[in-house]
Amino acid sequence: MKKKIVGLLTLGFTIILSGCSQWIDQGESVTAVGSSALQPLVETVAEEFQQDRPGQFVNVQGGGSGTGLSQVQSGAVDIGNSDMFAEEKSGVDASQLVDHRVAVIGITPIVNQDIGVDELSKDELKEIFLGKITNWKEVGGNDQEIVILNRASGSGTRDTFEKWILDDENPIASQEQDSSGMVRQIVSDTPGAISYIAFSYVTDDVDVLAIDGVQPTDENVTTNDWPIWSYEHMYTKGEPTGLTKEFLDYTLSDDVQKNLVGQLGYIPVSQMKVERDANGDIVE
């Protein structure tokens, strides 16, 4: 009798597991990797996208724009999130990739709130990151040593900042961080600290800096009066299909573009009054 019961239980578990296996096999997933500046938008869109799609998942990870571009080109992920054009990344064959521009992001220098400075010239900001200005009193601030914090190599945010502020010169060696959120936290906690993050990561515990009298605002980005900005790209290897295409179409839908994009600190591409190419030139 016991053997019969054990046999029936075993059969029952086998049927249940078989059913679970079939459900798992029917599930679909998309993996998007790369830009930490774009990550909050993609994560939020993914959460909404999945709500009415049981068994379909969008996995979103950071790692930086360079990682996103390299992994999507190799076929390791479905989508490579990037703050830079694929043409700007060494070792990436842009001809293999399809660009989906989902937003624009402004990037601003941020500082610890006790430095006593709220504006710099572009030249002053450049000289700070090149190590030529080392104390805030040299630019009208408090007698406080400047502590520089950079994003890690491969970051699209760093690439954009260096392109428009450092004129592609190499910054002085300093602490580096992969995460935009961690950069903000360290600047907030460290006397004399300066770095740069996307507008979407700015919070009340750090101060932003105007540059040559221009404030880091969405409106100034749309006119290019604030030049430190980039497109937010979601690259695919070839034209997207299946769930990847559905997710990208949803991200580019009017509902997302007119609501979520602005709410999360990004700028819809449709609001831009200028267009830039991969070289940074204004397209007429």
Image (cartoon, rainbow, N blue to C red):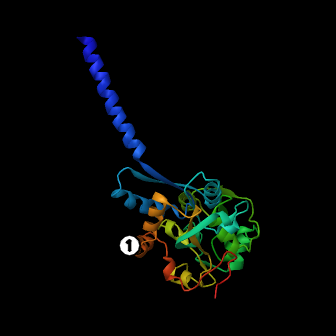
Give how far across and how far down residue 23 sits, in percent.
37, 42
Where does the C terminus fall, quadrant-wise? bottom right
Give how far across and how far down residue 48 sits, in percent.
37, 61
Where does the N terminus fall, quadrant-wise? top left
SS under mark 1: helix
Looking at the image, can residue 65 be seen? Answer: yes
Query: Which residue occupies the extreme bottom position in the image?
Result: 284
Observer-nearest of 228 and 211: 228
In this picture, is 282 found above or below 67? below
Q: Is residue 170 left or right of residue 34?
A: right
The residue that mark 1 highlights is 255
Pointer 1: residues within 10 angstroms few (<14), some, or many (20+)?
few
Give how far across and how far down residue 205 sits, in percent.
49, 65
Observer-nearest of 247 and 46: 247
Q: Residue at x 64, y 61 (%)?
A: 155
State which quadrant residue 194 falls in. Answer: bottom right
Looking at the image, can residue 195 be seen? Answer: no
Query: Which residue occupies the extreme left position in the image?
Result: 1
Q: Residue at x 38, y 49 (%)?
A: 55
State which quadrant residue 96 falls in. Answer: bottom right
Q: Is residue 11 left or right of residue 198?
A: left
State which quadrant residue 167 falls in. Answer: bottom right
Three-letter amino acid code of the residue under disc 1: Asp
Q: Is residue 56 left or right of residue 133?
A: left
Q: Residue at x 70, y 63 (%)?
A: 93
Observer-nearest of 215 and 46: 46
Q: Is residue 255 left or right of residue 205?
A: left
In this picture, is 66 found above or below 99? above
Give how far across and how far down residue 31 sits, in percent.
51, 53
